[in-house]
């Protein structure tokens, strides 16, 4: 391992993937002219990870941890992951996690069979080391990655193609970002165009906030597709360009840079701290930047939002001990006073017509940015 000139570090549990998926991915990356480091030996029980392995991780631009069912059984794998996350935080290493036949929430919360394997190892190790592993597992699940079962119905060949394409694109993008530090180089028209394309593709015009269990497979999905079909850029968690990025940072960036935020306020919206964080940030962006918030009151009474009453009261009270409680409550009250759409007051609750009206209003607003403070024709509740 004297030559530490690598692009990608592969971290994987040999018992799960060494002769299968990990091997296929390694050879496909090499065939694409990517310099890949993978360790070819299993760590002997009780043997510490050597410093050369850590140097290999540090030398790479990108790390791909393949989190599989038996990953948490290995001190070696967990040690690699902790070092990878450390390099991600301190040196900006790109991390593209692959959740291979495991549930992401099982990894994050160390539950199920994944959790059982972790607890067995936990009893044999010191608390400081174990805490580093816990932090690393939680951190890696906060980074957008691939879930093997969801790519082409679990077809591993297709997953490998997607990973190789992303890694190759990332290595090219890294050069664009590096070149941006040099004004003389950026003066070149073609380099500037490439960099502008790289930054612009992250910006969305509309941010949708919604509770998946209420509207994720219904109104929110239909509205998202309809806005896209109207030529509007909408932030999506499923955007392939988000692979390797931290969810919290991307949400913050998307809300800060969008022109319109549309929270879909449904009966379970307040049960999600993520939804409440998004709503509070929308209000802050409206106050600081004048961004437009266009709420949808989905099968709920706007008065209950404005007064945090009805179905929202009990759910909000569950968060009373949280440090952000007052911020969330104030955001709820403020958005409840905004003009927007009340789902059951438009076309007798016909959601298809509701979506058409929303898309029309959004398109009109984007075409006429000076009308950001103009009232919406669909608002029927403000003075209730």
Image (tube, rainbow, N blue to C red):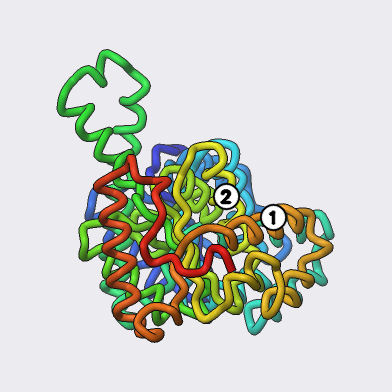
Left or right of 297 on screen, residue 174? left
- Mark 1 lies on a secondary structure that is helix
Q: Please name the residue that numbered disc 2 is placed on.
A: 283
Which of 30 and 274 lies nearest the eye of the viewer? 274
Q: Which mark is residue 176?
A: none
Q: Residues within 10 Å of mark 1 (few under 14, many from 20)?
A: some
* Residue that appears at 39% across and 59% down: 376
Which of 52 and 348 lies nearest the eye of the viewer? 348
* Residue that appears at 64% across and 83% down: 113
Q: Position of residue 39 (x, y in %)?
A: 48, 56
Q: Is residue 38 visible?
A: no
Contact flag, marks 1 and 2 (Cβ < 8 Å): yes
Q: Residues within 10 Å of mark 2 (few under 14, many from 20)?
A: many
Seen in the picture, residue 82 relative to 138 is either above or below; the reply is above
**Mark 1 → mark 2, Cα distance in angstroms:** 9 Å
Rendering quarter of residue 363: bottom left
Q: Please name the residue that numbered disc 1 is placed on.
A: 330
Q: Earlier in the sequence, mark 1 or mark 2?
A: 2
Seen in the picture, residue 192 relative to 358 is either above or below; the reply is above
Q: Position of residue 371 (x, y in %)?
A: 34, 45
Left or right of 295 on screen, residue 110? right
- Mark 2 lies on a secondary structure that is helix
Seen in the picture, residue 244 relative to 341 is either above or below; the reply is above
Assign the C terminus to one quadrant of the image. bottom right
**Residue positioned most to the top:** 184
* Residue that appears at 35% across and 82% down: 347
């Amino acid at each position: 391992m004297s030559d530490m000139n690598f692009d990608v570090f592969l971290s994987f549990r040999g018992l799960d993937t060494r002769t299968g998926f990990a091997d296929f991915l390694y050879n496909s990356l090499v065939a694409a002219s990517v310099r890949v480091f993978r360790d070819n030996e299993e760590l002997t029980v009780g043997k510490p990870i050597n410093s050369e392995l850590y140097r290999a991780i540090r030398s790479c631009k990108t790390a791909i941890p393949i989190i599989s069912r038996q990953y948490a059984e290995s001190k070696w794998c967990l040690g690699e992951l902790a070092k990878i996350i450390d390099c991600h935080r301190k040196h900006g290493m790109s991390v593209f996690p692959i959740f291979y036949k495991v549930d992401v929430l099982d990894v994050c919360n160390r539950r199920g069979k994944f959790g059982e394997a972790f607890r067995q190892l936990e009893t044999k190790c010191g608390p400081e080391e174990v805490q580093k592993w816990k932090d690393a597992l939680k951190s890696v699940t906060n980074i957008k990655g691939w879930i093997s079962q969801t790519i082409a119905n679990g077809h591993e060949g297709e997953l490998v193609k997607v990973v190789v394409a992303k890694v190759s694109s990332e290595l090219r993008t890294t050069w664009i970002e590096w070149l941006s530090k040099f004004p003389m180089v950026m003066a070149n028209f073609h380099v500037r165009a490439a960099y502008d394309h790289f930054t612009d593709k992250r910006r969305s015009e509309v941010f949708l906030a919604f509770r998946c269990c209420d509207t994720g497979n219904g109104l929110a999905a239909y509205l998202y597709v309809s806005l896209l079909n109207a030529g509007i850029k909408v932030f999506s968690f499923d955007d392939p360009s988000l692979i390797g990025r931290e969810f919290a940072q991307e949400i913050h960036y998307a809300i800060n840079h969008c022109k319109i935020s549309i929270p879909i306020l449904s009966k379970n919206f307040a049960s999600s701290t993520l939804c409440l964080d998004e709503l509070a940030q929308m209000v802050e962006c409206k106050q600081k930047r004048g961004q437009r918030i266009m709420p949808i009151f989905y099968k709920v009474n706007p008065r209950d939002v404005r007064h945090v009453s009805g179905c929202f009261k009990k759910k909000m009270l569950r968060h009373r001990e949280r440090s952000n409680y007052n911020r969330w409550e104030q955001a709820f009250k403020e958005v409840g006073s905004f003009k927007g759409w009340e789902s059951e007051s438009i076309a007798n609750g016909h959601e298809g017509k509701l979506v058409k009206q929303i898309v029309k209003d959004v398109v009109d607003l984007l075409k006429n940015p000076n009308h950001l403070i103009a009232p919406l024709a669909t608002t029927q509740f403000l003075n209730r």
